[in-house]
Image: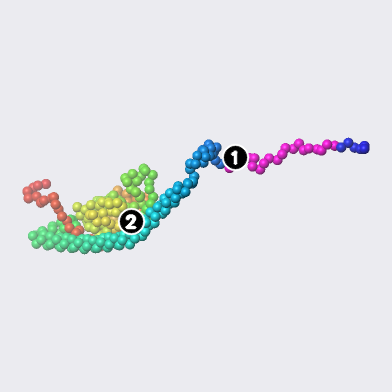
Amino acid sequence: MCGMPQQPPVRSSAPRPPRPDASMSLLTNVMDHSLDEGYAEAAARREAAGVGGMPKTVRAKLGLAAGLVLAALVVTVGAANARLAAPVVAKERQELIDRIERETTAADKLETGVDTLRADVSARQRVALKKDGGGEQADLVSILSGATDVHGPGVKLVVNDAKEASTGGDGTNPRETSGFSDTGRVRDRDMQRVVNGLWESGAEAISVNGQRLTALSAIRAAGDAILVDNKPLVPPYTVLAVGDGQRLSTRFQNSADGLYLHALQENYGIRTSISAEGDVRLSAAPSVIVRTAEPSTEKGTP
Protein backbone atom coordinates (compact mmCIF):
# COMPACT_ATOMS: atom_id res chain seq x y z
CA MET A 1 0.00 0.00 0.00
CA CYS A 2 1.53 3.14 -1.10
CA GLY A 3 1.06 6.48 0.37
CA MET A 4 2.75 9.18 2.22
CA PRO A 5 5.53 7.98 4.51
CA GLN A 6 4.48 8.01 8.25
CA GLN A 7 6.33 10.61 10.28
CA PRO A 8 7.72 9.52 13.65
CA PRO A 9 6.05 11.09 16.68
CA VAL A 10 7.50 14.45 17.61
CA ARG A 11 9.02 14.60 21.12
CA SER A 12 9.25 17.86 22.94
CA SER A 13 12.75 18.87 23.83
CA ALA A 14 11.55 21.31 26.57
CA PRO A 15 12.80 20.47 30.08
CA ARG A 16 10.42 19.00 32.65
CA PRO A 17 8.83 21.55 35.00
CA PRO A 18 10.65 21.77 38.36
CA ARG A 19 9.05 20.49 41.57
CA PRO A 20 7.22 23.15 43.59
CA ASP A 21 9.41 22.41 46.60
CA ALA A 22 12.69 22.30 44.67
CA SER A 23 13.79 25.62 46.14
CA MET A 24 13.13 24.36 49.66
CA SER A 25 15.35 21.30 49.53
CA LEU A 26 17.04 22.08 52.83
CA LEU A 27 13.74 22.58 54.64
CA THR A 28 12.33 19.41 53.00
CA ASN A 29 15.36 17.42 54.12
CA VAL A 30 15.00 18.70 57.68
CA MET A 31 11.30 17.77 57.75
CA ASP A 32 11.91 14.31 56.24
CA HIS A 33 14.86 13.56 58.52
CA SER A 34 13.99 15.38 61.73
CA LEU A 35 15.99 12.95 63.85
CA ASP A 36 19.74 12.89 63.40
CA GLU A 37 21.06 9.55 62.21
CA GLY A 38 23.29 9.18 65.24
CA TYR A 39 20.36 9.71 67.62
CA ALA A 40 18.24 7.30 65.57
CA GLU A 41 20.91 4.59 65.81
CA ALA A 42 21.29 5.12 69.57
CA ALA A 43 17.51 4.89 70.06
CA ALA A 44 17.44 1.67 68.02
CA ARG A 45 20.22 0.15 70.13
CA ARG A 46 18.47 1.08 73.36
CA GLU A 47 15.22 -0.40 72.10
CA ALA A 48 16.99 -3.61 71.05
CA ALA A 49 18.62 -3.88 74.48
CA GLY A 50 15.33 -3.28 76.28
CA VAL A 51 16.56 -0.06 77.92
CA GLY A 52 14.48 3.17 78.09
CA GLY A 53 10.90 3.83 77.24
CA MET A 54 8.02 2.66 79.38
CA PRO A 55 8.50 -0.29 81.76
CA LYS A 56 8.05 -3.64 80.02
CA THR A 57 7.39 -5.92 82.99
CA VAL A 58 4.39 -5.98 85.30
CA ARG A 59 6.62 -5.43 88.32
CA ALA A 60 8.14 -2.30 86.83
CA LYS A 61 4.72 -0.96 85.91
CA LEU A 62 3.47 -1.57 89.45
CA GLY A 63 6.51 0.27 90.84
CA LEU A 64 5.85 3.25 88.61
CA ALA A 65 2.19 3.30 89.59
CA ALA A 66 3.13 3.12 93.28
CA GLY A 67 5.52 6.06 92.87
CA LEU A 68 2.85 8.15 91.17
CA VAL A 69 0.34 7.30 93.90
CA LEU A 70 2.87 8.24 96.59
CA ALA A 71 3.61 11.58 94.90
CA ALA A 72 -0.10 12.33 94.60
CA LEU A 73 -0.57 11.43 98.27
CA VAL A 74 2.22 13.79 99.36
CA VAL A 75 0.75 16.66 97.32
CA THR A 76 -2.75 15.97 98.70
CA VAL A 77 -1.54 15.85 102.31
CA GLY A 78 0.42 19.09 101.84
CA ALA A 79 -2.59 20.86 100.38
CA ALA A 80 -4.79 19.61 103.21
CA ASN A 81 -2.32 20.79 105.85
CA ALA A 82 -2.05 24.18 104.21
CA ARG A 83 -5.85 24.51 104.15
CA LEU A 84 -6.08 23.53 107.82
CA ALA A 85 -3.29 25.93 108.82
CA ALA A 86 -4.71 28.90 106.88
CA PRO A 87 -7.25 29.94 109.57
CA VAL A 88 -4.57 29.68 112.27
CA VAL A 89 -2.16 31.85 110.28
CA ALA A 90 -4.88 34.39 109.56
CA LYS A 91 -5.79 34.52 113.26
CA GLU A 92 -2.16 35.02 114.31
CA ARG A 93 -1.76 37.73 111.67
CA GLN A 94 -4.83 39.60 112.92
CA GLU A 95 -3.63 39.31 116.52
CA LEU A 96 -0.28 40.77 115.50
CA ILE A 97 -1.99 43.66 113.67
CA ASP A 98 -4.19 44.37 116.70
CA ARG A 99 -1.15 44.34 118.98
CA ILE A 100 0.73 46.75 116.72
CA GLU A 101 -2.25 49.11 116.67
CA ARG A 102 -2.55 49.00 120.49
CA GLU A 103 1.15 49.66 120.99
CA THR A 104 1.08 52.48 118.43
CA THR A 105 -1.85 54.11 120.24
CA ALA A 106 -0.03 53.77 123.57
CA ALA A 107 3.14 55.28 122.09
CA ASP A 108 1.14 58.21 120.70
CA LYS A 109 -0.37 58.85 124.13
CA LEU A 110 3.06 58.74 125.76
CA GLU A 111 4.45 61.15 123.17
CA THR A 112 1.56 63.54 123.78
CA GLY A 113 2.21 63.33 127.51
CA VAL A 114 5.91 64.02 126.98
CA ASP A 115 5.12 67.09 124.86
CA THR A 116 2.73 68.36 127.55
CA LEU A 117 5.34 67.93 130.26
CA ARG A 118 7.99 69.64 128.15
CA ALA A 119 5.69 72.58 127.54
CA ASP A 120 5.00 72.82 131.29
CA VAL A 121 8.73 72.72 132.07
CA SER A 122 9.42 75.45 129.51
CA ALA A 123 6.67 77.63 130.97
CA ARG A 124 8.08 77.18 134.48
CA GLN A 125 11.56 78.05 133.22
CA ARG A 126 10.32 81.30 131.68
CA VAL A 127 8.50 82.23 134.88
CA ALA A 128 11.60 81.50 136.95
CA LEU A 129 13.77 83.65 134.65
CA LYS A 130 11.40 86.60 134.93
CA LYS A 131 11.09 86.18 138.65
CA ASP A 132 14.86 86.24 139.12
CA GLY A 133 15.17 89.57 137.35
CA GLY A 134 15.91 88.46 133.84
CA GLY A 135 13.34 90.91 132.47
CA GLU A 136 13.55 91.81 128.80
CA GLN A 137 16.82 89.99 128.37
CA ALA A 138 15.18 86.76 129.49
CA ASP A 139 12.37 87.27 126.93
CA LEU A 140 14.92 87.87 124.19
CA VAL A 141 16.83 84.74 125.13
CA SER A 142 13.59 82.73 125.10
CA ILE A 143 12.68 84.04 121.65
CA LEU A 144 16.12 83.40 120.16
CA SER A 145 16.35 79.93 121.70
CA GLY A 146 12.89 78.94 120.47
CA ALA A 147 11.57 78.37 123.98
CA THR A 148 8.52 80.63 123.59
CA ASP A 149 5.78 81.29 121.05
CA VAL A 150 6.46 84.17 118.68
CA HIS A 151 4.58 86.11 116.02
CA GLY A 152 5.25 88.97 113.66
CA PRO A 153 5.72 89.78 109.98
CA GLY A 154 7.61 87.27 107.90
CA VAL A 155 7.47 84.97 104.90
CA LYS A 156 5.74 81.73 104.01
CA LEU A 157 7.74 79.39 101.78
CA VAL A 158 6.18 76.16 100.45
CA VAL A 159 8.39 73.49 98.87
CA ASN A 160 6.84 70.40 97.28
CA ASP A 161 7.93 67.42 95.19
CA ALA A 162 7.57 67.49 91.42
CA LYS A 163 4.26 66.22 90.04
CA GLU A 164 6.03 63.28 88.42
CA ALA A 165 9.08 62.66 90.57
CA SER A 166 10.47 59.71 88.65
CA THR A 167 13.26 60.92 86.35
CA GLY A 168 16.95 60.36 86.97
CA GLY A 169 20.12 62.09 85.82
CA ASP A 170 22.83 60.93 83.46
CA GLY A 171 25.44 60.31 86.16
CA THR A 172 27.03 63.75 85.89
CA ASN A 173 24.38 65.69 87.78
CA PRO A 174 25.26 66.48 91.41
CA ARG A 175 21.86 65.29 92.66
CA GLU A 176 22.36 61.97 90.87
CA THR A 177 25.98 61.44 91.91
CA SER A 178 25.20 62.31 95.52
CA GLY A 179 22.95 59.29 95.87
CA PHE A 180 19.60 60.82 94.96
CA SER A 181 17.33 58.03 93.74
CA ASP A 182 14.81 60.47 92.39
CA THR A 183 15.74 63.98 91.27
CA GLY A 184 12.14 65.15 91.48
CA ARG A 185 11.94 64.60 95.23
CA VAL A 186 12.76 67.21 97.86
CA ARG A 187 15.65 65.95 99.97
CA ASP A 188 16.98 66.79 103.40
CA ARG A 189 19.93 68.66 101.87
CA ASP A 190 17.50 70.87 99.97
CA MET A 191 15.64 71.78 103.15
CA GLN A 192 18.92 72.41 104.96
CA ARG A 193 19.89 74.94 102.30
CA VAL A 194 16.45 76.58 102.44
CA VAL A 195 16.60 77.00 106.21
CA ASN A 196 20.20 78.21 106.25
CA GLY A 197 19.40 80.67 103.46
CA LEU A 198 16.50 82.11 105.48
CA TRP A 199 18.67 82.47 108.59
CA GLU A 200 21.34 84.21 106.52
CA SER A 201 18.74 86.52 104.96
CA GLY A 202 17.62 87.82 108.36
CA ALA A 203 15.03 85.40 109.75
CA GLU A 204 14.60 85.61 113.52
CA ALA A 205 12.56 82.42 114.04
CA ILE A 206 11.78 79.51 111.68
CA SER A 207 9.51 76.46 111.71
CA VAL A 208 9.08 73.63 109.20
CA ASN A 209 5.64 72.01 109.10
CA GLY A 210 5.01 73.34 112.60
CA GLN A 211 8.35 72.13 114.02
CA ARG A 212 10.17 75.08 115.59
CA LEU A 213 13.88 75.16 114.82
CA THR A 214 16.44 75.93 117.48
CA ALA A 215 20.22 76.01 117.70
CA LEU A 216 20.08 72.27 118.47
CA SER A 217 17.74 71.30 115.61
CA ALA A 218 18.80 68.84 112.92
CA ILE A 219 17.34 68.14 109.50
CA ARG A 220 18.15 64.61 108.40
CA ALA A 221 16.85 61.87 106.12
CA ALA A 222 15.57 58.38 106.94
CA GLY A 223 15.04 56.61 103.65
CA ASP A 224 12.80 58.88 101.59
CA ALA A 225 11.47 60.75 104.65
CA ILE A 226 12.79 64.06 105.96
CA LEU A 227 13.20 64.30 109.73
CA VAL A 228 13.24 67.52 111.71
CA ASP A 229 14.41 66.82 115.25
CA ASN A 230 13.68 63.11 114.63
CA LYS A 231 10.07 63.77 113.64
CA PRO A 232 9.14 62.67 110.10
CA LEU A 233 7.55 65.24 107.81
CA VAL A 234 5.51 64.76 104.66
CA PRO A 235 5.35 67.11 101.66
CA PRO A 236 4.46 69.81 101.00
CA TYR A 237 6.97 71.39 103.35
CA THR A 238 5.72 74.71 104.72
CA VAL A 239 8.47 76.93 106.08
CA LEU A 240 7.44 79.93 108.19
CA ALA A 241 10.01 82.56 109.06
CA VAL A 242 9.57 85.66 111.21
CA GLY A 243 11.39 88.75 109.95
CA ASP A 244 11.01 91.84 107.81
CA GLY A 245 8.58 90.24 105.37
CA GLN A 246 9.25 91.76 101.95
CA ARG A 247 12.91 92.42 102.62
CA LEU A 248 13.41 88.88 103.92
CA SER A 249 11.70 87.44 100.83
CA THR A 250 13.78 89.51 98.42
CA ARG A 251 17.09 88.81 100.14
CA PHE A 252 16.41 85.08 100.24
CA GLN A 253 15.44 84.84 96.57
CA ASN A 254 18.62 86.72 95.58
CA SER A 255 20.87 84.62 97.82
CA ALA A 256 22.83 81.57 96.69
CA ASP A 257 20.39 79.25 98.47
CA GLY A 258 17.40 80.99 96.89
CA LEU A 259 18.96 80.60 93.45
CA TYR A 260 19.63 76.93 94.26
CA LEU A 261 15.93 76.46 95.03
CA HIS A 262 15.03 78.24 91.80
CA ALA A 263 17.33 75.86 89.89
CA LEU A 264 15.55 72.87 91.41
CA GLN A 265 12.27 74.33 90.20
CA GLU A 266 13.54 74.97 86.67
CA ASN A 267 15.49 71.74 86.15
CA TYR A 268 13.54 69.14 88.13
CA GLY A 269 10.01 70.49 88.42
CA ILE A 270 10.12 70.91 92.21
CA ARG A 271 7.26 73.22 93.10
CA THR A 272 7.96 76.29 95.25
CA SER A 273 6.12 79.43 96.26
CA ILE A 274 7.10 82.29 98.57
CA SER A 275 5.04 85.17 99.87
CA ALA A 276 5.45 87.95 102.40
CA GLU A 277 3.02 87.69 105.33
CA GLY A 278 1.77 90.39 107.66
CA ASP A 279 1.62 88.13 110.72
CA VAL A 280 3.30 84.74 111.13
CA ARG A 281 2.79 82.68 114.29
CA LEU A 282 5.28 80.07 115.42
CA SER A 283 4.84 77.71 118.36
CA ALA A 284 7.60 77.13 120.87
CA ALA A 285 9.94 74.17 120.57
CA PRO A 286 8.96 71.25 122.85
CA SER A 287 12.05 71.74 124.99
CA VAL A 288 15.55 73.07 124.79
CA ILE A 289 17.88 70.86 126.79
CA VAL A 290 21.55 71.80 127.10
CA ARG A 291 23.72 68.90 128.24
CA THR A 292 27.23 70.21 127.73
CA ALA A 293 27.44 74.01 127.91
CA GLU A 294 27.61 75.67 131.33
CA PRO A 295 27.50 79.38 132.26
CA SER A 296 30.87 80.92 132.94
CA THR A 297 31.33 82.50 136.39
CA GLU A 298 34.58 84.24 135.55
CA LYS A 299 34.34 87.91 134.61
CA GLY A 300 35.95 89.04 131.42
CA THR A 301 35.91 85.54 129.86
CA PRO A 302 35.54 85.89 126.09
Counting from the top left corner in percent of width and height, residue 252 is at 28, 52
Q: Amino acid at mark 2?
A: Asn
Answer left or right for 193 relative to 292: right
Q: Quadrant of residue 120?
A: bottom left
Task: Let me know if residue 136 appears in the view.
Answer: no
Instruction: Answer whether labels 1 and 2 touch (C-beta < 8 Å).
Output: no
Q: Nearer the viewer, mark 1 or mark 2?
A: 1
For mark 1, what is the residue? 29
The kind of secondary structure element at disc 1 is helix
What number is the disc on residue 160? 2
Q: Quadrant of residue 174?
A: top left
**Which of these two is toward me, 5 or 20?**
5
Q: Residue furthest left?
A: 298
Answer left or right for 156 relative to 286: right
Picture residue at 10% right of the left edge, 51% below the top: 295
Above or below, 11 relative to 66: above
Q: Amino acid at mark 1?
A: Asn
Counting from the top left corner in percent of width and height, residue 293 is at 13, 50
Picture residue at 35% right of the left edge, 50% below the top: 182
Above or below, 300 relative to 157: above
Answer left or right for 89 relative to 107: right
The span picked out in magenta is: 7-32
Mark before the other along the chain sequence, 1 or 2: 1
